[in-house]
Amino acid sequence: MLWGFSALKEEYIKAINELETEMGITLLAFSGISIRNAELTKEDLQKIQELEKKLGLSLVAVNVE
């Protein structure tokens, strides 16, 4: 299971924003996604690592189930 930012309906965003305002905080919404590791060739892995270095990010290769 991987956790990522939730895709929220407008009504959910409104409810979250109201609570954030009331409490003076910021809330982040996460949802679970069923995944498995992607099978990569050495060349694929090298391309991902090069992009990570270029962008200054960490990337995870997965297949969403």
Image: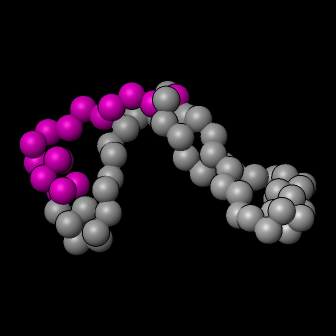
Residue 17 lies in quadrant? bottom right
Residue at point 39% right, 28% down? 36
The answer to which of 3 and 54 lies nearer the viewer is: 3
Residue that appears at 22% across and 55% down:
48
- Which is nearer the eye, 26 or 41? 26
Which residue appears at 12% of the width and 53% of the height?
46
Inspect the magenta stretch and tell me whether residue 2 lies in it: no
Q: Position of residue 50 (x, y in %)?
A: 17, 62
Q: In this rendering, does residue 17 appear at all?
A: no
Position of residue 60 in the picture relative to residue 45 (left or right): right
- The range drawn in magenta is 34-49
| Quadrant of res 15 | bottom right
55 displayed left or right of 9: left
Left or right, 20 with respect to 42, comes to right
Is residue 28 visible from the viewing direction of this image?
yes
Say which residue appears at 86% left-offset and 59% top-offset. Answer: 19
| Vertical comparison of 64 with 46: above or below | above
Residue 47 on image: x %, y %: 17, 56
Which image quadrant for residue 49? bottom left
